[in-house]
Structure formats: structure tokens, C-alpha cells
Amino acid sequence: MLMSEDPKQYSVNVRWTGGKSGDVDVRGLPTIRTGIPPDQEDISRMYTPEELFVAAGSVCFMNSFVHFTQKMRIDFKSFEVESVGTLEQVERSFEVTKIHSKATVVISSEDIRKKMERALELGAKYCFISNSMKCPTTHENIILVDETM
Amino acid sequence: MSDESHEYVVRVDWAHDRIGNMFVEGKPVVEVATPPEFDGHEGIISPEDLFASAAASCFMTTFITFTKKMRIDFKSFSCEAKGTLERVEKGFQFTKILIKATVAVESEDFTHKAERALELAGKYCLVSNSMKCATEHENNVVIG
């Protein structure tokens, strides 16, 4: 993987749209609506900052895992991860105190199980986002073999 | 906010190449990918973007909470967050987030209070407080 050592910068914009909600714009990409909307609006359709935080970690874990599978030249059929972040009171403020991630990978042959386990381990270890968080992320990995696929 | 703990559940499914989809129950699916600088894809939201977005949106919601407590009316709020990812011992890590916020208030009377609400928002932003790196703030209150 060609990776420059230079620092990289990520800019995002948030614009208040009323009530407790705002639109997150990332360089012209689809808007992510966040916050708590004004009365009567569909609250369930807006992302909370807490969800974006947990999602950042899960997506980074996926990217990091995919990177290691390519490096190790192993194929997988599918990958999914469900992460649960816990927000708790810490002294006078709240903090996300732990994240638990449960990943399921489907492979076509038992032969690469060990390598796949290793790719998942390395994916977690080198996840930039988890390494940027104070809280630990725990992992539960499930590898399934489906020879029919 | 109550004292008990809250849980946030997110699912990510790999789609193809270095692209996946992010799901939160009842909310729009967001396509996500590795960013171009790490052999990824142009034009798709990356986890690095989500990390900076989490801090920026939390800063906004925390600011609003304080404006309600302090009974401040404001006309608009916007902020830009810039996260810096740098190589450290073990791979890359965010080393800094700079949030530049602009708030418009109706009259001079609210300027100081709005500045105070921005300060408190920076201090109590739970997402920033969950990150290892420091968040720097540049706040601008204008009358308009």
C-alpha cells in the first residue's frame, strides 16, 4: 500500500438547521442530517453525534481489515460488523467509555481461516480511528465457511 | 441528560472493493469507503470524515443545549471542523481537531452570553471528550 507519511487533513462543515439539528457537509458529498430536529419532525431519521463517532470506528475497522486481506492475498465473500458504543457519565461530563464490535466474515474454504483471523486482528490493531479514541474497543470475530458460494 | 448509560448501535456491511454501507436503525444508509489517500475511493464519506463530523455535530448540539439553559436567542450557527491525522508510533492517529464556529446573534446584548455558551460547549462536548487528541476552538460571534 502506497501511503504517504504526510499529515492528512479532513474538513467538514456543520450548519444549524433549526431546533437541535444541523446538516453535516463533507466536501460536496451527500448531506448527513444530525441532531435533534424541531418538534414534529421525524427524529428517527437524523444521526446523532454519538452514532457518527461509533460509526467512524466501525467503518475504519472494515477498511483496515480489507487492507490486510489484500496484503495477505486472501479473499472473503462478505464482511459485516455491528458495534455498540456505551455512553456514560465520567466525572462532570459524558464520555463514550467502551465500544464492542462483533464482526462476521464468510469465506469459501476452511484453509484460510487462520489467515482471516489474523487479518481481523491486524485490522483492529491498526484501526486509526479506534487508536484516536480514549475508550477501548473489544472485538468478537465470527468466521463462517460457505463452500457453495 | 440522565445519569444512566446509553448505547449506540451501528452496523457496517462491506459492499465491494474498499466500499461499504453504514446502517443505523431507521436512518438513511450512508455509503462509506477508504479515502483516496489510503488507496481508497474519491467522493465517498470516509471514517476520517465521520470522526471529524462526530466532533463538529456534537459541538453544535452541546452549544444549543447551553443556549437553551442560558436563554440565548441566536440566528444562525455554523462550524467547520478540520481533523489532522498523523503518523505516530503505531500507525496513524488524529492528533488535533480545530473547530471554527460562527454564531450570529440579534444584538450586542447576547454577544458575551453566546461566547460563554460556545466555551461551555467546547468543554462539555462528549464526543471531543471521548477522543485522545485535543480540540482547539476559534469562535466568532457576529451581529446580524
Image: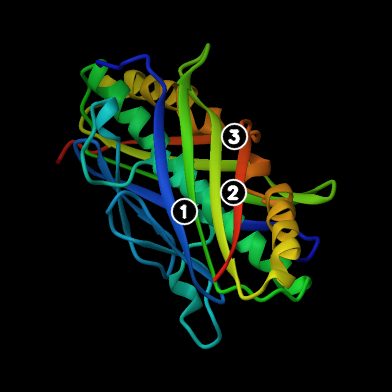
Kindly identify which residue carries mark 2. Answer: A85
Q: Amino acid at mark 1?
A: Val
Q: What is the C-alpha distance between the residues marked 2 and 1?
A: 8 Å
Q: Is residue B82 above or below residue B64?
A: above
Callout 3 crowding tier (Cα within 10 Å): few <14, some 14–19, many ≥20: many
Numbered label attached to residue B10: 1
Q: Amino acid at mark 3?
A: Met
Residue at 42%, 52% in the rendered image: B11
Q: Position of residue A145 (x, y in %)?
A: 27, 35
Could you say whether the residue bearing mark 2 is in a helix, strand or loop? strand
Numbered label attached to residue A133: 3
Q: Amino acid at mark 2?
A: Gly
In the picture as drawn, the residue positioned furthest to the left comes out as A149
- Is A65 left or right of A35, judged from the image as shown? left
Q: Are marks 2 and 1 in contact (CB under 8 Å)?
A: yes
Colour convention: rainbow
Q: Position of residue A138 (x, y in %)?
A: 58, 34
Residue at 21%, 18% in the rendered image: A73
In the picture as drawn, the residue positioned furthest to the top comes out as B89
Residue at 46%, 81% in the rendered image: A42
